Amino acid sequence: MIKYPSFLVVFLMIFTAVSLYQIKHFITKKEIELAETNKAIKTTRSDLHILKAELSYLKRPDRLEQIAKNKLNMKGILPIDIWNLKDLVDATKTFNESGS
């Protein structure tokens, strides 16, 4: 017949074995989850590099200039198109004085 202390030792061994198995199973699940997360991070970083390269390509000044001229019907800036702010204020004062 198994004595009381022997039964306790066997119970503790079985409990320890089951606990270690559960811990191992939990750690394995977390390692798989970590690997999936790392893979997602690498994919996102790769996508981010691709998007930055595409944005740089789309922001080229010569490309934007062609779009502005061909699609938006804009023209280049001429020296007469650049005004001094003081000239605008003077023109506004003159317009207000003549309109009153």
Image (cartoon, helix red, strand yellow):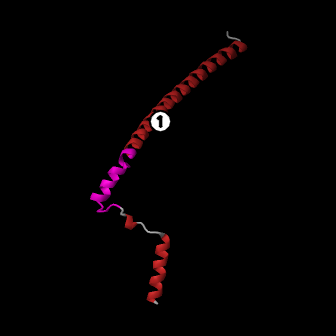
Q: Quadrant of residue 42?
A: top left
Residue at figure coordinates x 40%, y 43% from the top left: 51
Q: In this view, does 14 lie to the left or right of 64?
A: right
Q: In this view, does 38 lie above or below 60?
A: above
Residue range (magenta): 55-76
Q: In the rendered view, would you say 15 is above or below 63? A: above
Q: State whether residue 11 is above or below residue 93.
A: above
Badge 1 density bin: few <14, some 14–19, many ≥20, Cα 10 Å: few
Of the 4 image quadrants, the one containing the N terminus is top right
Q: Is the magenta stretch mostly helix, strand or loop?
A: helix
Residue 27 is situated, as x and y percent measured from the top left of the image, at 55, 26
Q: Residue at x 45, y 35 (%)?
A: 40
Q: Does the magenta stretch include residue 77?
A: no
**Could you say where residue 63 lies in the image, as x and y percent from the top left?**
32, 50
Q: Residue 75 appears in which quarter of the rendering?
A: bottom left
Seen from the viewer's position, the closer of residues 67 and 49 is 67
The answer to whether residue 12 is left or right of residue 36 is right
Q: Nearer the viewer, residue 87 or 40?
A: 87
Q: Nearer the viewer, residue 64 or 55?
A: 64
Q: Mark 1 points at which residue?
A: 41
Seen as rendered, the residue at the extreme front is: 79
Q: Which amino acid does label 1 sit on?
A: Ile
Numbered disc total: 1
Q: Position of residue 48 (x, y in %)?
A: 43, 40
Closer to the camera in the image, 83 or 71 = 83
Q: Seen from this angle, which residue lies furthest left? A: 70
Residue at the right extreme? 5
> Residue 37 location, x and y as percent?
48, 34
Q: Which residue is drawn at 47% across and 85% down?
A: 96
- Circle 1 — which element? helix
> Left of 42 or right of it: where is 6?
right
Q: Against 42, is 66 above or below?
A: below
